[in-house]
Amino acid sequence: RAFDAALRRDNPGSLFSWSQPIQMRMDDMQAGVRSQIAIGIYGPDIRQLQELAQQTADIVSRINGAADVAPQDVGTIPYLHIDVDRTAAGRLNVDTAAILDVVESVGGHVGPPVSTGDALIPTEVRIDAPQRRTLEDIKRLPVATRDDQMVELSQVAKITLTDGPAAIRRYQGERRMMVQANVRGRDMSSFVQEAQTTVGQQLKLPHGYRVEWGGQFRNLQSAVARLEIVVPITLALIFFLLVFAFGDIWVAGLVFLNLPFAATGGILALTVRSLPFSVSAGIGFIALFGVATLNGVVLVSCIREKRAAGLSARVASQEAAEERFRPVMATATVACLGFFPMAFSMSEGAEVEKPLATVVIGGLVSCTALTLLVLPSLYVKLDEWRRSRL
């Protein structure tokens, strides 16, 4: 932000887009722009596309979190348009092919190759430079009629000099203009959803024009879709292993309650630090669930051992919590200290490290406290409920 503010102060009117080298290259390969979000506008007329791209950029730039929003400028260059006036050519008895030959000779006519020794040398015929230096010189170029008379090129053609785009980009045969944007200070998913809604309401697309959204958020969508499959499978496997370890579905369910305890702390930690949910945060939740399950297994195993020694559920739970306090706290403390540097990292890759470490630290704090305080009480309630059913 400091660099951006300094450049805008010292170089007003310039457009700056901030990225990292590898990230910029990946963005360019994915969407054709060097930014996180690429908005493609498709249609037949290039000038209309330019107007729509500018309108889209104006709309997106007003959304909270938008940065470096701008149409993908290709610049302009002068174009010389020479259109044959067939009516005038017919009246002056000029063959259209003769007019086109003169027009081609302005830019250069590629002729047959010339053989010199063992080499073939390509040839090009072009009108001498002094005779085509200005627009007036080109208008005065002679064109032969069918009866070997000469007329000026401007008499049989309309010659104009206009500015136009330096390049016309296409995708799958359609003309396309891109609008690029980055996101700062908020999560990309909510930004894109708000931007899509706002652009859809405020941008009036003529018939035959459409808008497509691309960029990094496409990867986020696909990753979240995979997590929606992976996380339930992970939770199901954890529950199955708990049932297999304890041989009791109710005790396994009791240990499984540690996972919501852990998730609560992770969500609160993300909220306090104003960090969005991301793929790295999702991975942090998966890692957190493993540690939370381990703490629950350690405590419940100790309770069951004391119950087997003849203690009541209440006494066994209390003594197990006291005995396992140090191991559970040591596990949580070591993990928190290990993730602490990542949670406050400011180096390269911090955008990936911060959400993961924040989720783990916040989840371990809530999970440890609830494991030692709530889980023993729930075990006593479970035992009382079972006795009441006998």
Image (spheres, rainbow, N blue to C red):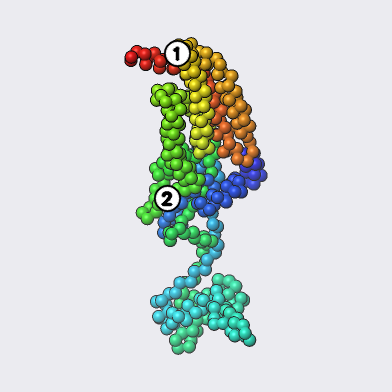
Residue at position x 51%, y 79% in the image:
102
Viewer can see residue 22: yes
Callout in the foreground (1, 2): 1
Q: Looking at the rendered structure, which numbered label has been put on residue 313? A: 1
Residue visible at 43% across and 61% down in the picture:
173
Check disc 1 and report its element: helix, strand or loop: helix
Is 49 or 361 nearer to us in this picture?
A: 361
Q: What residue type is disc 2 on?
A: Val
- In what element is the residue under mark 2? strand
- Badge 2: few (under 14), some or many (20 or more) residues near its Cα, within 10 Å? many
**Looking at the image, is mark 1 or mark 2 earlier in the sequence?**
2
The type of residue carrying mark 1 is Ala
Q: Nearer the viewer, residue 299 or 91?
A: 299
Is the residue 287 above or below the residue 144 in the image? above
Closer to us: 246 or 172: 246
Q: CA distance from mark 1 to mark 2?
A: 64 Å
Residue 214 spot, x, y in % from top left: 47, 48
Residue extending farthest front: 309
In the image, residue 35 sits, relative to residue 139, either above or below, namely above
Asked where in the image residue 241 lies, by quadrant, the reply is top left
Rendering coords of residue 303 (x, y %): 49, 17
Task: Using the image, tell me which numbered label, if any, was put on residue 120.
Answer: none
Q: Quadrant of the C terminus?
A: top left
Picture layout, residue 271 above or below residue 197: above
Residue 92 found in image quarter: bottom left
Q: Residue furthest left?
A: 389
Report the residue marked by disc 2. 211
Q: Position of residue 261 (x, y in %)?
A: 48, 24
Q: Quadrant of the N terminus?
A: top right
For image coordinates 46% across by 16% down, the residue present is 308
What residue appears at the point 55 percent right and 62 percent down from the top-left corner? 77
Along the line of sight, the residue nearer the viewer: 268 or 367: 367
